[in-house]
Image (cartoon, rainbow, N blue to C red):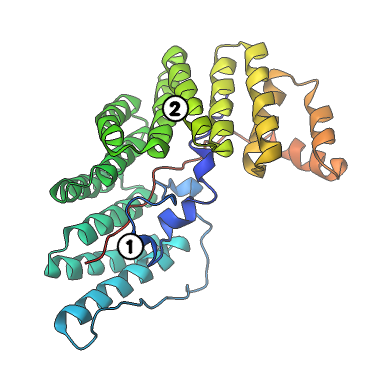
């Protein structure tokens, strides 16, 4: 059994932006922050508390009908984001839907495209994948209308993520291949690195380790050129997982050792734990020694590790950057 990691490098600094968003992110196109196509099993823990609802801040004149409409739409969108962060997906869906209705009255297709994608993420988190795909395709159409290739590519790639989460790697590969030319046209190397990684995961789910390794190695090369150490580490983890799937434990161990080296410079405790877990599969007699060396409090962490390795592997689901909005 192996546990692949989906774009782990984007799960810390980017994932919050994708799910949460800020008014600042709505001013830029395809920022370095990211959003995720989240499965219910990987969604943020549900909170019983009502989330704090932010108010928007717009330069629009509040005393004009257009200004009032924009502020209303932005505030509804921020309410939806706040609910989504708390895993209140139904409430988030209602707020995003009201925001979309308001944006549509003004005819700003960029605002509509972002909000359609946000609605899609709610449906994906609720397990309603076909509805999520429908809304993402509507988002793609809007991005095409404003000639935004970068965000068009991200929306298409998110469709691939949903198909893969749904257990349809062939359909996922079709969407990833569809998205690739737009990432190339936009010159988006970071997005392309994520795409290559997730394409490798789709091949891995088809038990096609040859093509999976080709994609993961290409992804690692791109991450390295971007000096994205966590992205590079996630790629090496998936390379190790591919070798482990082929029962090539020596090559798998080489890759996992490389992950640990990179994480010394750019720490990620989740990926580190997954790597130790993977090593426990490939080299079970050595893993306790490695964990003891890695932590200052080895007894406590070994107890946690022993608990962890008895649990089933659950792939981490992280997707493509959240679309940004340029001004109205």
* Residue farthest to the bottom, as pictured: 63
What residue does disc 2 label? 201
Seen in the picture, residue 116 relative to 53 is either above or below; the reply is above
Query: To which quarter of the image does residue 267 belong?
Result: top right
Estimate the x, y position of residue 280 in percent, counting from the top left.
72, 25
Which of the 4 image quadrants contains residue 234?
Answer: top right
In the displayed structure, does residue 293 sit left or right of residue 194? Answer: right
Mark count: 2
Provide residue 184's location: percent of width, then percent of height.
30, 32
Numbered circle sitting on residue 204: none
Q: Secondary structure at mark 1?
A: helix
Residue at numbered disc 1: 27
Q: Quick one: SS at disc 2?
A: helix
Residue at image location 39% in from the left, 35% down from the top: 189
Q: CA distance from mark 2 to mark 1?
A: 32 Å
Give the position of the C terminus as an image quadrant.
bottom left
Q: Answer left or right for 320 relative to 274.
A: left
Q: Position of residue 83 (x, y in %)?
A: 41, 66
Q: Camera-side residue: 268 or 3? A: 268
Residue density around tag 2, few if under 14, some if 14–19, many if 20 or more, within 10 Å: many
């Amino acid at each position: 059994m192996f546990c692949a990691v989906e774009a782990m490098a984007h799960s810390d600094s980017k994932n919050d932006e994708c799910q949460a968003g800020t008014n600042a992110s709505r001013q830029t196109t395809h920022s370095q922050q990211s959003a995720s196509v989240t499965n219910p099993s990987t969604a943020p823990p549900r909170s019983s508390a009502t989330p704090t609802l932010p108010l928007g801040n717009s330069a629009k004149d509040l005393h004009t009908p257009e200004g009032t409409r924009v502020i209303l739409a932005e505030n509804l969108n921020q309410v939806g984001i706040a609910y989504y962060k708390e895993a209140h997906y139904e409430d988030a869906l209602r707020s995003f839907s009201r925001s979309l209705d308001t944006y549509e009255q003004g005819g700003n297709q960029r605002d509509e495209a972002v909000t359609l994608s946000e609605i899609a993420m709610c449906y994906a988190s609720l397990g309603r994948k076909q509805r999520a795909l429908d809304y993402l395709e509507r988002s793609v159409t809007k991005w095409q209308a404003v000639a935004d290739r970068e965000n068009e590519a991200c929306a298409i790639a998110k469709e691939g993520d949903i198909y893969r989460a749904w257990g349809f790697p062939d359909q996922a590969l079709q969407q990833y291949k569809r998205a690739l030319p737009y990432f190339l046209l936009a010159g988006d190397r970071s997005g392309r690195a994520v795409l290559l990684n997730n394409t490798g995961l789709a091949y891995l789910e088809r038990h096609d380790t040859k093509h999976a390794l080709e994609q993961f190695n290409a992804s690692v090369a791109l991450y390295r050129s971007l000096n994205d150490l966590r992205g590079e580490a996630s790629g090496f983890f998936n390379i190790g997982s591919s070798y482990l799937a082929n029962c090539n434990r020596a090559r798998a161990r080489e890759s996992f050792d490389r992950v640990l080296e990179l994480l010394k410079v750019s720490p990620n405790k989740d990926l580190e734990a997954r790597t130790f877990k993977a090593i426990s599969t490939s080299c079970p007699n050595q893993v306790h020694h490695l964990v003891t060396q890695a932590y200052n409090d080895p007894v406590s962490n070994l107890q946690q590790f022993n608990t962890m390795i008895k649990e089933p592997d659950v792939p981490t689901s992280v997707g493509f950057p959240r679309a940004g909005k340029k001004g109205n």
